[in-house]
Image (cartoon, rainbow, N blue to C red):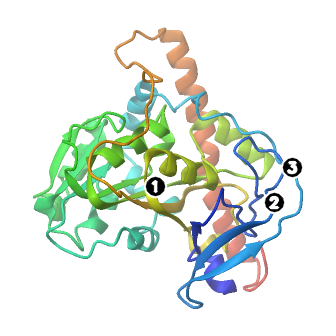
Amino acid sequence: MASSMLYGAENLAIVRGRIAPNGLGFNGSDLHGRKCLPRINLVVGNSNLGGRNRTLVLPKCSVSVPRPASQPRFIQHKKEAFWFYRFLSIVYDHVINPGHWTEDMRDEALEPADLHSRNMIVVDVGGGTGFTTLGIVKKVDAKNVTILDQSPHQLAKAKQKEPLKECKIIEGDAEDLPFKTDYADRYISAGSIEYWPDPQRGIKEAYRVLKIGGKACLIGPVYPTYWLSRFFADMWMLFPKEEEYIEWFEKAGFKDVKIKRIGPKWYRGVRRHGLIMGCSVTGVKPASGDSPLELGPKVEDIEKPVNPFVFLARFLLGAMAGVYYVLVPVYMWLKDQIVPKGQPI
């Protein structure tokens, strides 16, 4: 069990209320970062142990209050994210991914999506360079897969990959998908939610485009508990807590919502710095049609002019904060090489 938890193989599913993660550097807390949750029931599914109900009694504790999702970070804006990836696309596959999003992590994170048929219709939202899509087309025919992203620079990289030649590749907005209701069997999104100004709207769209019984699989970051990592996370982009993912999925109407923790093996389960790819969240659409959730106007209007000085300041500050998260995996990799195996890092 210890090995399974260290390498992120533990699945968590809500039974009642919210989740309260234990161990691995997480502080169980409510959505506002207040004290830990009281006694709560979880279903723990583990490949070694089998599923079972478990009651956790969590002590009281306190964590800092994260910046609300309704107040976007410097690169949690569509225009800033567009230009951020204009430059990041050059090195994304070869410099950024190896530290945060490996092939082993990708395949593990996609496992809960249950891609059991080559004839499934799949949309990969925020698909970027197609790194995640390469994992999808191992299980599903490329002609049935659509890659959507707002960055033409990232998509240009995807178009160059031979296994993706038959995929449909389109520019689009994760919060306003160009697919009809009840369209897809599977909705996949990896490393995209952190840039959405309105994550609840994006997950509501995931619900809409799925067929009845379809499954959404959203792979994204987890919020840090270490103070310096929290500071840079709240400057850079959205790092949700696990319970926030659960709440967004349930509010959108999804059932059987589960979380699977993932992470590079050299972290040895350490998650206090947060992880850019830290969990895989899945939910099933129980009924056809749109989500029952009603939302107001979009948080961000991309057609609205932006003050160029404000844009430049947000872009530069956000990019500098992002450098911290390029260095964190290097630091953790070095610790893994130096600290004897079996000892915590």
Distance, label 3 to label 2, CA atoms, is 13 Å
Direction right: furthest residue: 60
The Cα–Cα distance between marks 2 and 1, rounded to whole angstroms, is 42 Å
Q: Are marks 1 and 3 in contact (CB under 8 Å)?
A: no
Q: Secondary structure at mark 2?
A: loop
> What is the quadrant of the N terminus in the image?
bottom right
Please tell me which residue is depicted at 67% across the width and 75% down the height of the picture.
268
Above/below status of 91 relative to 105: above
Left or right: where 23 falls relative to 240: right
The image quarter containing residue 5 is bottom right
The amino acid type of the residue labelled 3 equals: Ser
Report the side of 277 relative to 58 (left or right). left
The percent position of residue 43, horizontal first and vertical second, equals: 61, 74
Callout 3: helix, strand or loop? loop
- Say what amino acid the circle numbered 2 marks: Pro
Tell me which numbered mark, 3 or 2, is placed earlier along the sequence: 2
Disc 2 target residue: 38
Residue 213, image quadrant: bottom left
Tell me the tag on residue 62: 3
Residue on which the image places disc 1: 95
Query: Dot 1 surroundings within 10 Å: few (below 14), some, or many (20 or more)?
Result: few
Q: How many marks?
A: 3
Neighbour class for label 2 at 10 Å: few (<14), some, many (≥20)?
A: some
Horizontal and vertical percent position of residue 75: 52, 32
Which badge, 1 or 3, is on the more N-terminal residue? 3
Tell me if label 3 and label 2 are in contact, CB under 8 Å: no
Residue 111 in the image: above or below residue 134: below
In the displayed orientation, state which residue is furthest to the bottom. Answer: 48
Q: What quarter of the picture does the C terminus occupy?
A: bottom right
